[in-house]
Amino acid sequence: MKIYELVKTQVIDSSIDNVFDFFAKPENLKTITPEKLSFNIITPTPITMDKGTVIDYTIRLFGIQVHWRALITRYDPPHEFIDEQIKGPYNFWYHTHKFKEVEGGVEISDRVNYSIPMGVFGRVLHFLWIKRDLEKIFSHRKRIIDNIFVKNCPDEDEAHERNN
């Protein structure tokens, strides 16, 4: 089984508590997920995040609605949490979210280790589409997160200058 890795980081002009609180609300996933994926949480809201929390949702991939179940396997506020896919489109999905105070705000780090089903055919799909689509999804997330935290900053002009 081939394991791929996607790593993305960004710095947000906010406090670590504000940033972590935003990410600790699964309901905010809909806000940062591209509309074309038709993200929808099935688990009744509000959801209280903790180790052992299970979150069910659906997304649309290549026009097909897919059920995804995630399990929070580590929860260490305000520094880190890990979600693992226990049902969904991947053979394996392990997403580590880390938050660290740095000069200028908070560094958000996403590290996703994942595996595609379907053997060699899955590897071809990864090369042709899946890797590119994941890059686009995380680029979209970055833009939305930047906008959310700039809008919530007391001095938007100052925050915009720091984020550009």
Image (cartoon, rainbow, N blue to C red):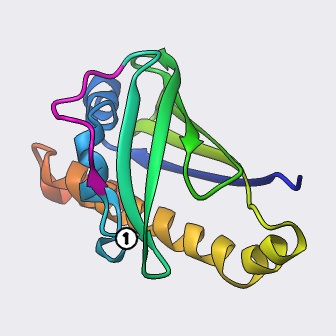
Where residue 130 sits: x, y (%)?
Answer: 65, 73
Which secondary structure class fits the magenta region best? Answer: loop
Where on the picture, by quarter, is residue 74? top right
Residue drawn 31% across the image and 61% down it? 39
77 left or right of 30? right
Q: Nearer the viewer, residue 135 or 119?
A: 119
Q: Residue at x 63, y 77 (%)?
A: 132
Residue 100, image x and y in percent? Answer: 50, 28
3, above or below 66, in the image: above
Q: Secondary structure at mark 1?
A: helix
Amino acid of disc 1: Leu
- Judging depth in this view, the residue of 125 and 10 nearest the camera is 125
Q: Which residue is mark 1?
A: 37
- Asked if residue 99 can be seen in this view, the reply is no
Q: For this rendering, which residue is in front, 85 or 23?
A: 85
**Residue 158, x across and y down, in percent:** 21, 53
- State whether residue 51 is above or below residue 120: above
Q: Which residues are magenta?
A: 40-49
Above or below — where is 42 with respect to 143? above
In the picture, residue 66 is in which quadrant?
bottom left
Residue in the picture at 47% in, 67% down = 137
Quarter location, residue 154: top left
Q: Residue furthest left?
A: 154
Quadrant of the drawing holding the C terminus = bottom left
| Residue toward you, 44 or 30 | 44
Task: Let me know if residue 10 appears in the view.
Answer: yes
Q: Residue 30 magenta-drawn?
A: no
Q: Is residue 77 left or right of residue 82?
A: left
- Which residue corresponds to the image point at 24% horizontal and 57% vertical from the top-left? 31
